[in-house]
Image (cartoon, rainbow, N blue to C red):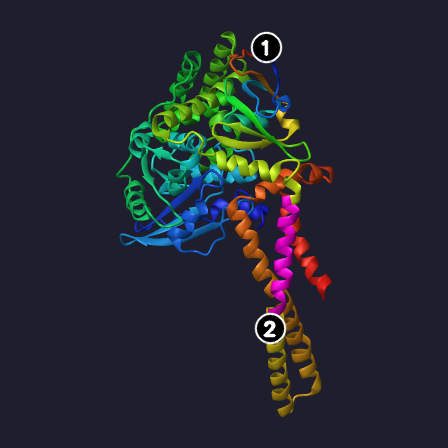
Amino acid sequence: MSGYKPLSQLRIGEKANVVSLGGGTEFVRRLLDLGLISGTSVEAVQRSPSGDPAAYYIRGAVIALRDDDASKILTAPDGVQGFCPLS
Amino acid sequence: MGLTNSSVGRGAIENFKLNNDGNSRVIALAGNPNVGKSTVFNALTGAKQHTGNWTGKTVSNASGEFQFGGRTYTLVDVPGTYSLSASSAEEEVARDFICFGGADAVAVVADASCLERNLNLVIQISQCVPNMLLCVNLMDEAEKKGIKIDLEELSLQLGVETVGICARDGSGLDELKNKLEKVSSGELTYHRRKIEYPEEIQTALDGIIKEVSKMSDKIPAQWIPWISVKLLEADKSISGPLRKFLGVDIFSLENVKQASEQADRYLKDNGFTSEKVRDLLVGAIVKRAEEIAGKCVSFTNDNYDSKDRKLDKLFTSKATGIPIMLLMLAVIFWITIVGANYPSQLLSALFGKVENLLSEMLSGTQAPPWVEGLFVKGMFRTLAWVTSVMLPPMAIFFPLFTILEDFGYLPRVAFNMDKFFRKAGAHGKQSLTMCLGIRQKFRFLRI
């Protein structure tokens, strides 16, 4: 499981692949609809001056996510096709 | 702006009961937020509607008309939504009107510069709406970024009639109206490709489809696959609208319930949790969107968004983000306050002259003094004061703010301010409504 971390902990410029999504049904549905299905590549682009939220590059769009929400997205390092450790 | 229960709640749909007198048609205008839907709406109907970025500016009771081919088309501007599985009141209204509103056609607007993201909604709508026209907007923007769209291939892949437009300068709109006429009359219905699901999911789905198909007298054929997916997903939010539209509550029918339970059991036995099922069902559409975008969109410039990203760094970095924001707001307030001075004085002088004229007129008549006091010194003077003080700053501030909005700067403000505003129990977007309020304050301080 080394290298697996929540999206909120990605450094700026770091890329990763989505492994799994936590949180309530509606929230997860929303993230899925934005393209955050497992295997999707994401990149942390920028942090707000106040530190939160952060902007992520997801399927061709830059989307802002609060740390509260981004911490519910588990990622694997770029190049590792993560399996869901909690199935 | 105003999201009220009556403008967005279920009752809103009732406002659009169709007048099917054969010569008029109702078209739903749908799409993701920020794709230029309102620009398309204005371009077609000529209505003076503000093109805004924030939810609450486009509410479900926006509609306009245009004439084409001897018919009246009523265009209904549906709230922007990312998916037909609604996660807010607005999205629910959008979904309900798109699927159950009974419009003669649904025109879906997409942004050529980020087509893949838009395709999620496009594919979902194509699976449950037979009369659909895809309008790929902002083609000029895409061209500038070196993004090429193969519209014919797109049309083929989706099985949907497609047209490329640039609503801002009006190109493609004639073709749009032409195709809309054919689509809404049922002349052009393509063959939609089925969404491909993993084998076990498809087997489970087939079981449900078999049962639902038995009600083909009540349920339109093209809805059967889509409703079956909703049943498998256990998406109860459509049971209400379905019941209203079809007169039957699918979720409570015995044979359908049994088929769903059987499907659930089959999937669980094969190691699929209900979360996994949901992820795979939505994921299938996302993957299909990726596949289609891969076939139809080509980027001739790999760094097409490097300028935007550099600007974003400037507007949201720790060092420059907030100073630039404060500077921008300061400049706008300064222009408003200074620029409004002269017009305010002019208006004041003008109203003063009119007031004197009114007083003279009244003194010439036999009217008692209280008439002049009430109507001239009271009502008229108050009206004059308020207008000459409030109108010039509003006429300057709102256009300036709109320019910022059109440049796309305002979401960066919300992004910067979100943390501070959340500490106060609000959120970033409300920093903008606060700006509008501060402008009012400045006006009164100056007096």
Which chain letter matches label 2?
B
Task: Decide: few, some or many residues near mark 1? Use Cα within 10 Å; few <14, some 14-19, many ≥20.
Answer: few
Check disc 2 and report the residue beneath it. B347
The circle drawn on residue A85 is 1
Q: Main secondary structure of the magenta part?
A: helix
* Any part of residue B209 in sight: yes
Q: Nearer the viewer, mark 2 or mark 1?
A: 2
Q: Is B154 left or right of A5, judged from the image as shown?
A: left
Kind of residue indicated by mark 1: Pro
Picture layout, residue A80 above or below residue B115: above
Secondary structure of the residue carrying tag 2 is: helix
Kind of residue indicated by mark 2: Leu
The circle drawn on residue B122 is none
Query: x, y percentage for residue B377?
Result: 68, 79
Q: Is B307 left or right of B346, judged from the image as shown?
A: left
Query: x, y percentage for residue B67?
Result: 32, 54
Q: Quadrant of residue B182?
A: top left
Real-space Cα separation, disc 2 to disc 1, in angstroms? 71 Å
Magenta stretch, residue numbers: B324-342
B39 or B178: nearer the eye?
B39
B112 or B227: nearer the eye?
B112
* Any part of residue B58 in sight: no
Which chain letter matches label 1?
A
Q: Is B152 left or right of B224, judged from the image as shown?
A: left
The quadrant of the image that shows the C terminus of chain B is bottom right
